[in-house]
């Protein structure tokens, strides 16, 4: 979360030292549970419930166990494919809809936007049962389609992209239209390239949200081959409740991709939160 | 980023008038293009969002089991709900959860934003560390905290024992279990709201503070006369979104941490709905409870929308 003001030269005074001490203590307390998880993943079965914080005999056996006893690689692959497809298709559809809502003139545009906007107020847990009934009626229960298709549609992305397009200067598009380009060409060759910053920020955010999704995959799938990593570790914990070393290793593997994404794409994540938070 | 832009961006007048002068075949082309661009998302939202919203109300009047047997039973589900102590318990638990989490999270995340807005060595690390729980899935969060809180051997249980609070089974007794859910919720979400507050704070021009300092205003006075009023839109946004997010959230966490226990003490309303539908097969009853929650949320949002005249959220183009 770098901003220019933090890089500015700071004089080391008593106040700075105090702020630094408070900040570091809070930071370490906040990440302590995650540190305990990662350390625990390298402990033996007896070590993991011992009072020592550090592993006395560090081992990677837990990870081998997790990958060999349950099809954990399959869970990871499922999560990856499902999250990636949702992210790409959702951003494509949302950017098309947002472009139309921001730029094209047609009767009922504002009304349509308000209707789409109002669906944002409803989140999955509230309409979980009827959504399940709809998806079951469509014959999508226990399939990749059931995991992916319903998760594509949410007004949040349309809303953010529309805000972005409204703020975008329209001269380039108008020049292309005057040259006789179709709306599709304008969207594809002018608007999409200009959207790259917001699309990259949103894609990180969407991928993260879908990788971490639990409730929908849990209710819509039952076959072990369709399990996502979150459903996998929840089931894993029920099976190996006493063996915390395995549970923590599995949790670490499930959390690691998101921690990596956070380290590499921190700026994008923060930017999309800021954008979302300001309208 | 775009955070500093004024919330209402208007179409240039010139472009609009030029558009109006164009002939009708072009307008028709534009309308057709709009229709096609909007088709995929509109269709999907209709089927997977709007239809479930309508069904939520309709299904409540039916008895529906896991095998799809459907029969109309009128208001029986709603009568059952009103007479179900478990429903009222889950509603009360959710109310406590919202009433505690929303203000505490507000204060905590604002305080953290004020802290990480300062310049000091390592502030970048502190910001990242405070935010990082947010990227972890709630299932992992639930499992890790369950581990931290295992009776006698969990890290937190040992720490409690060291300060003379040994023998407490945090996840084993109703009050402390709900308190744990509250603390964990704040722990993983505070970084998100901290970022939103930080953006709000950074949008306040530093000249205001410089001027106040020249006038001899102390830090507290600056906070009261500059920060609080200029942060009002952000504060309002945080209160609105966090109240809705908290009221409908927590299901994954409760599932992984307590399964609603002990003695239903952490059965939030969303977990109650989940349990009724997917563990007991009472889809109709679950839909009735879900539609009640839906109506409560719509009323709450409508109220908020009316209070703010909806102005800050809609960018009506003319």
Image (cartoon, coloured by chain):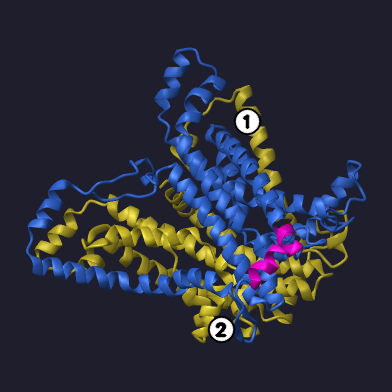
Chain colours: A yellow, B blue
- Place residue A183 in its image quadrant: bottom left
- Please state the chain letter of the residue tagged with numbered disc 1 in the rendered image: A
| Residue B287, visible in the rendered structure | yes
In the image, A42 versus A75, the foreground residue is A75
Numbered label attached to residue B210: none
| Residue A140, visible in the rendered structure | no
Per the image, the residue denoted by label 2 is A141
Left of A51 or right of it: where is B57? left
Give the magenta range: B76-90
> Residue A228 at what x, y percent from top left?
61, 75
Estimate the spatial distance between the alpha carbons at disc 1 and disc 2, rounded to whole Å: 53 Å
Q: Earlier in the sequence, mark 1 or mark 2?
A: 1
Q: Residue at x 72, y 58 (%)?
A: B88
Total numbered badges shown on the rendered structure: 2
Is label 2 in a helix, a strand or a loop? loop
Circles 1 and 2, Cβ within 8 Å, touching? The answer is no
Per the image, the residue denoted by label 1 is A19
Is label 1 in a helix, a strand or a loop? helix
> Residue B262 at what x, y percent from top left?
82, 61
Looking at the rendered image, the disc whose residue lies closer to the viewer, 1 or 2, is 2
Q: Residue at x 53, y 24 (%)?
A: B224
Q: Residue at x 46, y 69 (%)?
A: B49
In the image, B317 versus A212, the foreground residue is B317
State whether residue B9 is above or below residue B218: below
- Place residue A245 in its image quadrant: bottom right
């Amino acid at each position: 979360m770098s901003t220019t003001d933090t890089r500015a030269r700071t004089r080391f005074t008593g106040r700075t030292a105090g702020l630094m001490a408070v900040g570091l203590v809070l930071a370490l307390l906040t990440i302590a549970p995650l540190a305990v998880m990662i350390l625990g993943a390298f402990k033996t079965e007896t070590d993991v419930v011992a009072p020592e914080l550090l592993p006395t005999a560090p081992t990677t056996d837990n990870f081998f166990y997790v990958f060999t006893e349950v099809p954990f690689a399959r869970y990871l692959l499922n999560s990856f494919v499902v999250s990636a497809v949702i992210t790409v298709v959702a951003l494509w559809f949302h950017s098309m809809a947002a472009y139309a809502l921001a730029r094209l003139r047609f009767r009922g545009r504002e009304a349509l936007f308000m209707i789409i906007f109002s669906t944002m107020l409803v989140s999955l847990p509230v309409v979980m049962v009827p959504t399940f009934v709809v998806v079951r009626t469509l014959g999508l229960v226990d399939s990749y389609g059931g995991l992916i298709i319903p998760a594509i549609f949410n007004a949040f992305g349309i809303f953010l992209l529309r805000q972005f397009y409204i703020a975008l200067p329209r001269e380039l598009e108008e020049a292309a239209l005057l040259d006789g380009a179709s709306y599709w060409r304008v969207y594809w060759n002018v608007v999409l390239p200009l959207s790259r910053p917001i699309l990259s920020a949103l894609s990180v955010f969407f991928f993260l949200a879908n990788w971490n999704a639990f409730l929908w995959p849990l209710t819509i799938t039952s076959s072990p081959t369709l399990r996502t990593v979150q459903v996998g570790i929840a089931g894993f914990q029920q099976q190996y409740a006493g063996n915390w070393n395995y549970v923590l290793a599995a949790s670490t593997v499930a959390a690691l991709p998101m921690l990596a994404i956070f380290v590499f794409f921190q700026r994008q994540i923060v930017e999309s939160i800021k954008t979302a938070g300001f309208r | 980023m775009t955070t500093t832009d004024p919330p209402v961006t208007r179409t240039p007048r010139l472009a609009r008038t030029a558009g109006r002068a164009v002939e009708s075949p072009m307008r028709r082309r534009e309308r057709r293009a709009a229709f096609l661009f909007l088709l995929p998302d509109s269709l999907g939202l209709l089927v997977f969002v709007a239809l479930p919203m309508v069904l939520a109300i309709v299904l409540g009047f039916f008895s529906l089991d896991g095998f799809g047997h459907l029969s109309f039973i009128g208001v029986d589900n709603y009568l059952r709900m009103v007479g179900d102590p478990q429903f009222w318990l889950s509603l009360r638990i959710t109310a406590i959860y919202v009433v505690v989490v929303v203000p505490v999270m507000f204060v905590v995340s604002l305080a953290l934003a004020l802290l990480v807005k300062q310049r000091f060595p390592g502030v970048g690390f502190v910001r990242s560390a405070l935010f990082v729980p947010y990227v972890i899935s709630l299932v992992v969060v639930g499992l890790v905290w369950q581990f931290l809180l295992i009776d006698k051997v969990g890290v937190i249980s040992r720490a409690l024992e060291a300060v003379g609070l040994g023998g407490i089974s945090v996840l084993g007794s109703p009050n402390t279990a709900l308190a744990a859910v509250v603390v964990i919720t704040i722990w993983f979400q505070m970084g998100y709201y901290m970022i939103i507050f930080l953006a709000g704070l950074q949008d306040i021009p530093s000249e205001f503070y410089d001027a106040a300092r020249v006038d001899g205003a102390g830090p507290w006075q600056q906070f009261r006369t500059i920060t609080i009023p200029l942060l009002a839109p952000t504060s309002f946004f945080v209160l609105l979104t966090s109240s809705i997010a908290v009221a409908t959230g927590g299901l994954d966490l409760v599932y992984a941490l307590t399964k609603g226990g002990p003695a239903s003490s952490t059965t939030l309303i969303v977990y109650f709905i989940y349990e009724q539908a997917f563990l007991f097969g009472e889809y109709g009853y679950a839909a009735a409870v879900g539609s009640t929650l839906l109506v409560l949320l719509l009323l709450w949002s409508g109220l908020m929308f009316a209070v703010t005249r909806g102005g800050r959220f809609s960018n009506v183009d003319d």
